[in-house]
Amino acid sequence: ATLTDTPTEQELIQKLLNAGQEHLFADWDAPGTNDDAKTTFLTTLARVDNSYPGGLTGYISNARKLLAEAQKGANPFEGLEPHQPAKVDLTQFDETYDHFEAIGKTRFDKTAIVLVAGGLGERLGYNGIKLDIPVEVTETTSYLANYAANLLAMEARMETPRPVPFIIMVSEDTDAKTRASLAANDYFGLQKEQVHILKQELVPAIADNDGKLALKKKYELILKPHGHGDIHMLLHTSGLATKLADEGIEHFVYVQDTNGQVFNALPAALGVSAEKDFDFNSIAVNRIPGEACGGLARLVGNGSEMTINVEYNQLDPLLRATVSPDGDVPNEQGFSMFPGNINVLIIKAASYVKILKETQGIISEFVNPKYADDAKTVFKKPTRLETMMQDLPKLFGPDEKVGVSVFDRRWSFSANKNNIIDAASKAAAGGPPESGATAESDFYLAGRMKLQAAGMDVTEAEPEMILDIPMTPGPRVIARPAFALTLAEVKEKISGGSIAGQGTLVLDGKDITLENAEITDGSALVVKACPGAKVTVKDLKVDNAGFELVKLTAEEMESADTPEYLKLRGYRIENRGAQICEFTAPGDYIVE
Ligand code: UGB
């Protein structure tokens, strides 16, 4: 390279030359030719150098180490046998559930929510950020709006309300659009100061076992995402984990970008974390064999044990080599042997801060190169180091307690991760489609589960196939977080009544009670009450044209005028005459 650069740039170049990266600076044009490209290249190198703890040379040496292990074919599970983890079973709405929920709801003022939203969602193929996709199209609420509403509802239930810290991890792919969405919607009612955006940087791809950084072309690195595990590093380097812990936060809760169910399980899961004093609590579901969701197991051997997520691509080989020669096969209930990780994690702040200080938040990186030769010396394409946020317990010692809280699958988890083609083939193979339609269908299902828990009579509509994806079209029930955050609250506010088929019920507001409401198939009732409006719906029979679920025609599926968020579910929902009762001034109201 022709070193016409600043001293810091020269230092960086020298550092990289010493680290075997001569190829980055070979064949440089003479000064005056392509100078802009050179500057951009050096700026990128400097940015990565700054963002990665240990800098680029640290990254290169970590890569060499991990690549050497991968080349040797080291089995990360050598000598380990999977056993059931410490579990709390919350799959039933029973006394245990009520017990933990009651504890959890007293913890909202000591909880921060961390949303990892740096992923582009390549499997979904949506042209925007996933947080902007509506989780439901009855009222069209985006994932981000839904998360924010849950935070506000948590605040409304605190003895002394305080803002729930909301940390959003973004990446170059999602940063601008996430900020734009927050700004355009006035932060969805949150205070700007309670929202903390942390940006993860991409990392350079690596071309070979010597850790040579891969070039797209002269003066341009290939950069790739480093995985959701970056959140730990960013909470450390930003100082935010320590700051929030100092301000009284006792638990950090990690959620993914498209899981509309997560806040259903949160109160009880927080209760488990608090009562069991878990340093790390993984929310889990009964896993379907072969599903793209890791298995949570207690790995015992080599003189120690550790409860950890075994990622979905590693689970079957581990089971085959140890406890299940047939691999990842269903048990009597049709589930996989180990609970499925849905990447909703609750981490105790005190232990977290300590571990972050000890490790700088670098969470157990791994590398997964695809080799072109048997000797494993050539890669098919450049690889990179990755991290997963659920790997944090790998850094724990024997004193840290890791546990698993198992919830009903559709109560706590239904993501929107797959495009309609892939979702249909997943469904055909007997697995969960995890698509736009199923995520919405499960959103309503959770609403129905709430009504049923309160004793309301719910008759489900027949399942339908939309674009070869099975979904249950109703009843479509939305119990907004403002209405109730816990099952206990739903039970207090709803008694008697029934809803059937494709009936719709939307409840939004803290002081709404429903006594003996009957919503017939296809009818709809929407009740919204502002703070201070006390609404009693009593002995009301709702029989109207309601909301209709209308499948998109082939033409509409093709048309550029159809919003993409409708195309990814294959239908829209139209108001044909729903009864909408909206109370915008404080007072006592009765709807009969
Ligand atoms: N994400 C980031 O913020 N940054 C990144 O660099 C990458 C992702 P995916 P994945 O619950 O179904 C996870 O890609 O990695 C965010 C668990 O590892 O949707 O295939 C991204 O925006 C797996 O054990 O998931 O699998 C999104 O919010 C299982 O639990 C989140 O990270 C699986 O999720 C997840 O990213 C699941």
Image (spheres, rainbow, N blue to C red):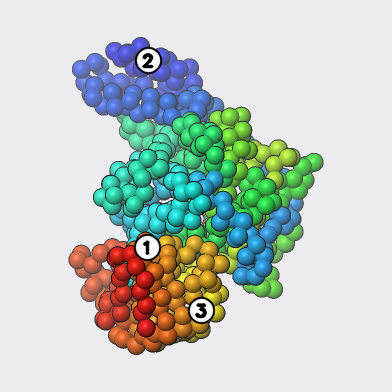
Dot 3 corresponds to which residue?
A: 495
Badge 2 marks a residue whose secondary structure is helix
User: Is the CB of mark 2 within 8 Å of ligand 1?
Assistant: no
Query: Is residue 386 at all visible to an observer of this figure?
Result: no
Q: How far is mark 3 from mark 1, CA to CA? A: 22 Å
| x and y, in percent, of residue 252 in the image | 54, 45
Of discs 3 and 2, which sits in the foreground? Answer: 3
User: Is the CB of mark 1 within 8 Å of ligand 1?
Assistant: no
Observer-nearest of 164 and 17: 164
| x and y, in percent, of residue 374 in the image | 58, 43
Residue type at mark 1 is Gly
Q: Residue drawn at (34%, 52%), measured in percent from left and top?
A: 189
Dot 2 corresponds to which residue?
A: 8
Q: Are marks 3 and 1 in contact (CB under 8 Å)?
A: no
Q: Quadrant of residue 476?
A: bottom left
Dot 1 corresponds to which residue?
A: 532
Query: Is residue 127 at all visible to an observer of this figure?
Result: yes
User: Seen from this angle, which residue lies furthest front?
Assistant: 587
Observer-nearest of 362 and 423: 362
